[in-house]
């Protein structure tokens, strides 16, 4: 691996950083580069490309599974975290914690982001994966996203971001570093938003306690209309929300609850919640994921798809 630590854009970043992410698993990366300055990241990317070093962008690591062997390359993290609301618009840098953006929109009485209360991760991660919950997702509000590509700052409109359910153009083309976004939202009563967000936090804290080492829901929900008619007939109306069926419905049918391997366990109360109970490994976690996919495929004839992203 080339010696890059003397270059100024690495600053005080530590090397051989363990990408433990939120699930508390994963091995080391060879390099870790973080900066608040897009120019520094651009210089870093150029140097990495010239040296032939692979690189990936990581936010807060809340929705990733890192291999036990780590990542042979560099992890880049943008740290710009300014969030500013004015009128019905909010501008946010993509290194900001998502909760900071949620809090700012609630305080400004702007509706939409409050349903993402207590979802871990960064603003950039939310744009990247078109985050959403309880009837709202980011693409409803996003006007523009700026990013770094090939050493230049560019921007995409909402349409150019090619949003879909938990998808975006950034997810399909990973050589872009998200820098900021602009949201346009509607005004409502701030106190009502606070009450709704508090209830969402209560429910989410019961399901995903803050101390629980997990990557959130592992599998995406499924659109009812996309399922075979015979399968649609098996789904009760109470299991459908916004035209989607929770993947946990099917996972529970194949015996997911309470399954475990090594230190990784599936919750007894939620079939799509897989957590690191003790000293689980990425190998344990991926084994469980593949086993669940196999069971659903054999029982129902269709595939469930991961929401989490893999590194290494």
Image: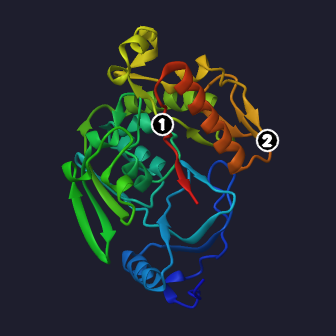
Picture coordinates of residue 200, whole percent (x, y): 50, 29
Count the marks: how many?
Answer: 2
In the rendered image, the vertical position of residue 126 relative to residue 238, given as above or below: below
Q: Is residue 11 left or right of residue 262?
A: left
Neighbour tally class for label 2: few under 14, some 14-19, many 20 plus, Cα within 10 Å: some
Report if residue 77 is visible in the image.
no
Q: Is residue 28 left or right of residue 190?
A: right
Picture coordinates of residue 207, whole percent (x, y): 61, 29
Picture coordinates of residue 25, whole percent (x, y): 69, 53
Rendered residue at 52%/89% (across/down): 7
In the rendered image, the vertical position of residue 43 relative to residue 308, given as above or below: below
SS assignment at label 2? loop
In the rendered image, the vertical position of residue 239 relative to residue 286, given as above or below: above
Q: Is residue 18 left or right of residue 216?
A: right
Rendered residue at 46%/9% (across/down): 234
The residue that mark 1 highlights is: 305
| Residue 262 numbered mark, or none | 2
For marks 2 and 1, the one nearer the N-term is: 2
Q: CA distance from mark 2 to mark 1?
A: 23 Å
In the rendered image, the vertical position of residue 137 relative to residue 206, given as above or below: below
| Residue 175 numbered mark, or none | none
């Amino acid at each position: 691996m080339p010696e890059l630590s003397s270059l100024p854009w690495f600053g005080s970043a530590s090397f051989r950083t363990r990408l433990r992410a939120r699930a508390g698993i994963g091995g080391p990366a060879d390099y870790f580069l973080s900066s608040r300055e897009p120019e520094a990241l651009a210089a870093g990317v150029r140097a990495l490309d010239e040296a032939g070093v692979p690189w990936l962008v990581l936010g807060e690591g809340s929705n990733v599974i890192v291999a036990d062997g780590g990542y042979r390359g560099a992890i880049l993290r943008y740290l710009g975290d300014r969030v500013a609301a004015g009128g019905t618009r909010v501008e946010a840098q993509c290194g900001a914690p998502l909760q900071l953006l949620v809090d700012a929109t609630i305080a400004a009485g702007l509706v939409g982001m409050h349903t993402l209360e207590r979802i871990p991760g960064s603003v950039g991660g939310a744009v990247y994966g078109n985050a959403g919950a309880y009837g709202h997702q980011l693409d409803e509000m996003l006007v523009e996203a700026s990013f770094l590509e090939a050493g230049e700052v560019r921007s995409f409109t909402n349409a150019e971001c090619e949003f879909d359910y938990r998808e975006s153009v950034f997810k399909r083309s990973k050589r872009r570093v998200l820098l900021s976004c602009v949201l346009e939202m509607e005004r409502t009563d701030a106190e009502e938003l606070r009450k709704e967000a508090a209830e969402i936090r209560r429910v989410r804290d019961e399901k995903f306690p803050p101390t629980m080492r997990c990557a959130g829901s592992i599998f995406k929900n499924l659109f009812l209309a996309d399922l075979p008619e015979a399968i649609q007939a098996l789904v009760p109306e109470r299991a459908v929300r916004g035209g989607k069926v929770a993947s946990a419905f099917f996972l529970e049918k194949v015996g997911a609850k309470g399954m475990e391997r090594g230190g990784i366990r599936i919750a007894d109360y939620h079939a799509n919640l897989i957590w690191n109970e003790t000293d689980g490994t990425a190998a344990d976690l991926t084994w469980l994921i593949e086993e669940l996919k196999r069971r659903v495929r054999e029982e129902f004839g269709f595939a469930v798809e991961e929401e989490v992203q893999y590194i290494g």
